[in-house]
């Protein structure tokens, strides 16, 4: 029997997940069916219950249900616990296993696809919301020289600094700061705020971009966002958006469900929107 998967969200029409997973299934020869599920806000559990009753094997979870999925799951992986949110579930009998592959997808895109090793580099991440929280441990595992978290609401950056220091096993210095307090230049600057969704520019001093730095916006499909424009005006030539992160987190979920990891290059090429 063909195994069934879905992505659940509200809205859901915009989701690229069916395209990505169907492409992965074709290249790996896996026999799966993958659909979009629109759940009413407040109706997450009922939709998932019904999908499981129909034999569904797993789901991707997108806004606004990542916290509902965390509550629904019976077994949350450390990645989901650290992020406080879930983006993939696997159903086995009564068990609902939950993961969050966003952080690992980001790091794989940086290190593998963009050939930007983090070890020994100074890394700055903008924002202290769910996206940054999920990225913390995968970033620290790469042993950067330093990780600085910058946020408008300084207390949230400081809270993530404390969380990172509490959980990391290495000795990477971590600091949570306000935009005014950031000093020096960074090799990798990651925009994990939601600013690009609103075409806004974080109050970032362009002196943070080191000459050979990579400027990376976790948003995808928005072209040259205000953050990437700021980097470009500061002389940065290595610019990227989150299309690779999107494909890599999907590949992690696919491998978790199916036991085979698809190559992502073709999917990334097809989903890439030029940075102009
Ligand atoms: P997500 O789950 O996508 O991380 P979130 O938890 O709502 O979303 O967090 C959004 C983040 O983007 C926050 O760090 C927010 O900063 P504040 O905590 O100070 O509000 C940040 N953010 C949103 N718009 C921004 C902007 N225009 N400039 C700078 N930071 C912005």
Image (cartoon, rainbow, N blue to C red):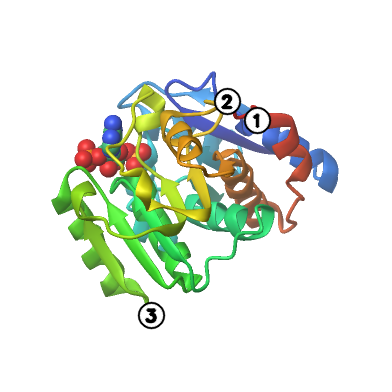
Picture residue at 46% right of the left edge, 40% below the top? 231
Pick the front one: 61 or 47? 61
236 to 227, vertically: above or below: below
Query: What distance separates the C-alpha of mark 1 from that of mark 2?
Result: 7 Å
Please provide percent x and percent y for residue 7: 55, 33
Residue 99 appearing in the image: no
269 to 213, vertically: above or below: above
Check disc 1: other Cα within 10 Å, few if <14, some if 14-19, many if 20+. Answer: some
Q: Where is the N terminus found, in terms of image quarters?
A: top right
Residue 102 appearing in the image: yes
Query: What distance separates the C-alpha of mark 3 from that of mark 1?
Result: 36 Å
Where disc 2 sits, the SS reads strand
Pointers 2 and 3 in contact (CB under 8 A)? no
Foreground tag (2 vs 3): 3
Please provide percent x and percent y for residue 164: 30, 67
Pointers 1 and 2 in contact (CB under 8 A)? yes
Name the residue tied to disc 1.
Answer: 18
Name the residue tied to disc 3.
Answer: 169
Q: Where is the C terminus found, in terms of image quarters?
A: top right
Check disc 3: other Cα within 10 Å, few if <14, some if 14-19, many if 20+. Answer: few
Where disc 1 sits, the SS reads helix
Pick the front one: 254 or 131? 131
Picture residue at 27% right of the left edge, 38% below the top? 203
Name the residue tied to disc 2.
Answer: 36
Foreground tag (3 vs 1): 3
Indicate which disc, 3 or 1, sits on the residue closer to the N terminus.
1
Beta carbon of the mark 1 residue lies under 8 A of ligand 1: no
Residue 100 tag number: none
Q: Is residue 1 left or right of residue 255?
A: right
């Amino acid at each position: 029997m063909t195994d069934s998967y879905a992505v659940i969200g509200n809205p859901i029409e915009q989701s690229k997940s069916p395209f990505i997973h169907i492409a992965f299934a074709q290249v790996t020869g896996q026999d799966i069916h993958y659909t979009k599920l629109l759940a009413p806000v407040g109706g997450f559990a009922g939709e998932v219950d019904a999908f499981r009753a129909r034999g569904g094997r797993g789901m991707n979870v997108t806004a606004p249900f990542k916290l509902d999925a965390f509550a629904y799951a019976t077994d949350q992986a450390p990645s989901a616990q650290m992020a406080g949110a879930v983006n993939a579930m696997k159903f086995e009998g009564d068990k609902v296993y939950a993961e969050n592959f966003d952080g690992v997808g980001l790091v794989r895109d940086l290190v593998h696809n963009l050939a930007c090793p983090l070890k020994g580099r100074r890394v700055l991440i903008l924002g202290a919301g769910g996206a940054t929280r999920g990225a913390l441990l995968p970033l620290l595992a790469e042993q950067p020289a330093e990780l600085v978290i910058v946020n408008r609401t300084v207390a949230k950056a400081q809270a993530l600094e404390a969380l990172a220091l509490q959980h990391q096993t290495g000795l990477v210095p971590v600091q949570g700061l306000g935009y005014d307090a950031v000093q020096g230049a960074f090799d990798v600057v990651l925009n994990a705020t939601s600013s690009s969704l609103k075409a806004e520019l974080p109050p970032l001093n362009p002196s943070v971009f080191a000459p050979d730095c990579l400027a990376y916006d976790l948003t995808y499909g928005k072209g040259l966002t205000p953050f990437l424009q700021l980097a470009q005006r500061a002389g940065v030539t290595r610019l990227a958006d989150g299309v690779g992160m999107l494909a890599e987190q999907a590949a992690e979920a696919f491998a978790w469900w199916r036991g085979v990891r698809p190559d992502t290059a073709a999917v990334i090429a097809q989903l890439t929107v030029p940075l102009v």
